[in-house]
Image (tube, grey):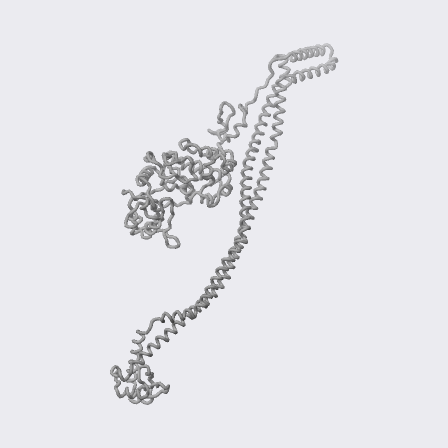
Amino acid sequence: MIAVSRTNFPSGGEYAAAVQNPGVSFSDADLRGATTELTRLGMPRAISGNFASVFALTAADGRRYAVKCFTRDVPDQRERYEAISRHLAAVAPSRLSQPWKMDFEFLPEEILVSGRRWPVMKMAWVEGIPLDRWLDAHQHDGLSIRALADRFAALVGDLESLKIAHGDLQHGNLLVASDNTLRLVDYDGMFVPELAARAAAELGHRHYQAPTRGTQDFGEKVDRFSAWVIYLSLTALAVEPTLWRFLRKPDDEHLLTSDADYQSPAGSWRLDQIASVSPEIKGIAELVRHYAQAPLDAIPALVPLPRAKPPASPGSPGSSATRTVTVNGTAPVSPGRPAWLDTHLTANEGVEPKAHYAGRSTLDRVVAAIVALSVCVSVGNAFIDFFAAADEVGAFALCVWLIGRGRRSRPEWREAKAARKSRQAQLKGLAGAAATMKRMTAEFERDDARLAKELNEIQQARANVETTRSREHTAIDKRAADAAARIGQRLRTAESAKQQSAADELRRLIDAHVFAELHRHTIVAEVGNISGLGPAAARNLAGYGIVSAADVRVSLVQGSGAYNTRMAVFQLPNGRSTRIEGIGEKKATALQSWCDGIAQRSRRTAPKALPPARQMQLDQQHKTLIDRLHAERDTIESSARSGKETVNRRLAADIVALDDRKRRTESERAVGHAAHQRNSTQVRADALEYERVARAAELERQAQRHLNYFHYLRFSLFGF
């Protein structure tokens, strides 16, 4: 391929002119017989980029192609595209998570411009919606966005497994098809292993690239930062859709984050807002914050959040009933449990604690001796004197008191009592978690409904303002159109009068020329040219004043009698009508034909236009009226524009106030959503903590069975 200076490449306009005639411009069979997609103005529809213009063509068999025409040279362009094409052609569709791969063909000498053929990229047309426009349409459908995030993660996983990188992962190069699967387009900066020794052809969209990226950063890891950035936006939007309108403007060229957030990640307010959505999203946001300043080689591959799965049935393999995981030898961790809950669990939870007395004290032995002595004495007295048994009730009561006193003196009992009080205090503090959650949810829903209603009112008020503006503009336009129509009618009348004056003047000029010519041709002089008319007849006509062709005015009148003849009646110059002796129908007809011939010839030589001086004179006669009418029409149009501008200025303050109110309300709503998510997460954690503490309290209550009166008595007597 001949090297071409980038300054010599055709411009987008030159390519547009060429693709209007595909049969001449293209050599490829599909493109040569294709039709070019045109705009409403009849020009080829083009999508222009940094170094190329893309045109849409439809082949004769109905297949659509995108044809990329290069406006500047890219080093080793052909070798790059051929390497990319070879690598992708070897990838079986079955290895891909979805049909994201685009078929293309690099044609090095294809389109004819200025007598020379230039390279193009012939690509199969990809039907889909750019990611940002899809999100704009589905911003409130969290489930669909989360599903798309999973598909995006799968696409990134495909690229990682194939050891390739797109080089410019961004919303414009990710199209969402009708089945909500993704399509990846624009492979200009793609990396494949065959290109490992080369530098990057481009650096990608600035809102999706780390500040540390340079032209030497060209390898299979170059997409990783972009992947984390896009995945963060998708997962955050799936949880909190209001971020779409809160963190970006409609015409922004990014999703939720921009290059400013990567330049100063520590102070990024966007990342702060995203991080407040949920603990999981916060984790991803903090990773993006860290990776923005890290070397590209140090950024790991995208690790997506686990997909939601239906719970396993009890007792099935992998169910929580049969499988737990121990972390660092402490709390058993359920595989599906959120990570933040691990810090609220204690080791060996769910196992009944063992509580018992150990190490008898002197008081324990005294209690045991007194109780044993009292029992022996009471039993002996009962055999000696049955009626004395009633006197032993006091002794029994003393024994019970001593047992209780000894039990309460034991450290095991005091610790159990303190633990029970602590649990009760915990339960008391956490008992309101459910009620708090219900109250918080009700308050959030009430506030959110209020803000949603306010947004609807703002939207309706904004629509009313637009309706008012449209109605007033329409009224102004109608008045202006009616007035302009009247002026237009008068202008047409004036122009018509001017043209009619010129036409009448020209007609009179022509008639004068014809009359002069007729007057110049005398009958006597040209009698030989008049069939059947001799000199005597000519002299006879002259005697009646009919000398030249201009004097001939004859009509044929039906005669009376048995003969079907007509008489020639002449109108004399003095106005009388008469018959002239010797001039019958035949001679009169010949005389009239001679006059008509002269008139026809003279009309051919007559003036075709008025003399310039006379034309200017006529124009000047009508110019004043026409100029005044044009001025009136210009005044009407200017007045209409001024009226519309007045309406716009009058309504501008309302529009600005409504837009500002809308932004504040949306911001308040987004902050409310984030705060509710954050606060409700803590309350839900407190509710789970309440359940844990309640279970622990029950276990401790059961453990206290080993510290009751019977166990203490046994321990004081026997030491176990």
Residue in the picture at 38% in, 44% down: 50
The image quadrant of residue 212 is: top left
Residue 490, above or below 22: below
- Residue 682 spot, x, y in % from top left: 56, 33
Q: Position of residue 99 (x, y in %)?
A: 38, 40
| Viewer-closest of 77 and 3 | 3
Query: Would you identify the image quadrant in which residue 435 lies?
Result: top right
Q: Is residue 635 above or below residue 227?
A: below
Asked whether, in this view, residue 292 is left or right of residue 553, the answer is: right
Closer to the camera, 314 or 462? 462
Left/right placement of residue 640 relative to residue 101 reads right
Q: Is residue 516 above or below residue 27?
A: below
- Residue 383 locus on image (x, y percent): 71, 10
Residue 147 visible in this rendered orientation of the protein: no
Q: Which is nearer the eye, 600 or 325?
A: 600
- Would residue 474 be visible to someone looking at this image? yes
Residue at position x 37%, y 54% from top?
Answer: 42
Q: Is residue 303 left or right of residue 464?
A: left
